[in-house]
Image (cartoon, helix red, strand yellow):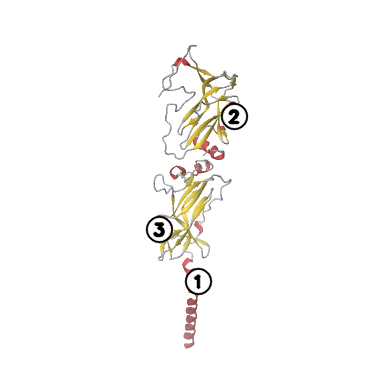
Amino acid sequence: MLIVGDNLKYLIKQYDVVSEDSFDNTSVSLRLGKTIIRMEPPTSEKTFIYYGEDIPEEFFKEEEITQGGLIIPPKSCILASSYEKVNIPNGYFGLLQTKGSLARLFVSLTCTDGQIEPGYSGNITFEICNHSNFYIKIKPKQFVGQLFLFKTSTKQVELYAGKYQNATGPTKHKSE
Amino acid sequence: MIIDLKQRTTTDWSKFDSYKKSMESLIFVDKKNIKDDGACCLDFTIGERWFNQSNSQWYIIPDDGIILKSTEAITIETNEKLGVPLNVFGVVTGVGRNIYSGGMVSSGKIDPGFNGKLRIGFFNSSRKKMTLKKGETICACYFIQSETSIVAPLPAYIDESQSLPTKGGFKVKKFLLANWDKILTIAIAGFALYVSILALK
């Protein structure tokens, strides 16, 4: 069941899901946070990343978004995060979607990793991909995402306590 | 889905009032009677007042209880005060303890936004008299989340029990109505006796 309207508005207030001004009738609006992580190979040679294993630190480059905005080159991807800290209460499950206007520029906010489990607390990492042939510029704190909250069938599940809990910005891949 | 009362009840009125439209709105009860963890029902006990259907008057229940004869019915107010959020609907049902004694609770519904003490219709379907005492469990309620929220709550509950009489002619009036012919005969006979005594003097 998707939570909307007053049910959502008062749920946000009751459980401090996110700041109250993020309420948007059927979802929670999320803004772009100030920090990003670019993932780039250090050389032009063919570079492998092995799934399930640590990625060398030199592949990552952390940046602060300037007032001029974040520039995402064509066919590139970055890690960013929500400006808001989000708390998903027990009994609810979050699904992140790209704002329609951004999606229409062929920019996606997630790489199909938009699920946020009950009990998660922290900033939400965005895997922003620019699928277009244009340079896309996004200003800091611009609304980029929508978080939908669904009610789960029971509250008797283990709450999220995984490796990405309590994130304060974008979180890099962590091996198992 | 029936509401999980362990997580969705409060004795704090301000919490109830603040989140009465939330998906996780809370049911207010001033005294929680939840039997065990995960229970779906709230128990309600006999309170201070009962309603005499024969004269449409409320009365205080005496400490030794109220006697309900066979096939008699009364309305009893619960001891517990209840507040129902704007998106929750309640259903009143009987309790197991009355199954073998023949006590029947009239089916009832509690509208979203209800605020006050429940008034429970109780019928003695047995052939024996029953005594109902304050504090005894009279009914149970379960609650269901509604898809709609009502716009405004129902009027607030007003406690009028302080100004009510303890005894209410429930028995006297009923006795008079049932035996008026005999009473009239006795009265005429008494009057005739009195006149006869006067005549003898």
For label 2, the residue is: A100
Q: Does the image show residue B201?
A: no
In this orientation, which residue lies closer to the viewer: B61 or B126?
B126
**Real-space Cα distance between discs 1 and 2?**
77 Å
Q: Does the image show residue A150?
A: yes
Q: Position of residue B87 (x, y in %)?
A: 53, 45
Q: Nearer the viewer, mark 1 or mark 2?
A: 2
Q: Furthest-bottom residue in view?
A: B200
**Real-space Cα distance between discs 3 and 2?**
60 Å
**Chain under callout 1:** B
Q: Residues within 10 Å of mark 2 (few under 14, many from 20)?
A: some
| 1 and 2 marks in contact (CB < 8 Å) | no
For label 1, the residue is: B177
Q: Secondary structure at mark 3?
A: loop
**Chain under callout 3:** B
What type is the residue that disc 2 sits on?
Answer: Gly
For label 3, the residue is: B99
What type is the residue that disc 1 sits on?
Answer: Leu
**Chain under callout 2:** A
Residue at 46% x, 31% y is A120
**Real-space Cα distance between discs 1 and 3?**
32 Å
Residue at 59% x, 29% y is A100
Q: Position of residue B162 (x, y in %)?
A: 49, 57
Q: Secondary structure at mark 2?
A: helix
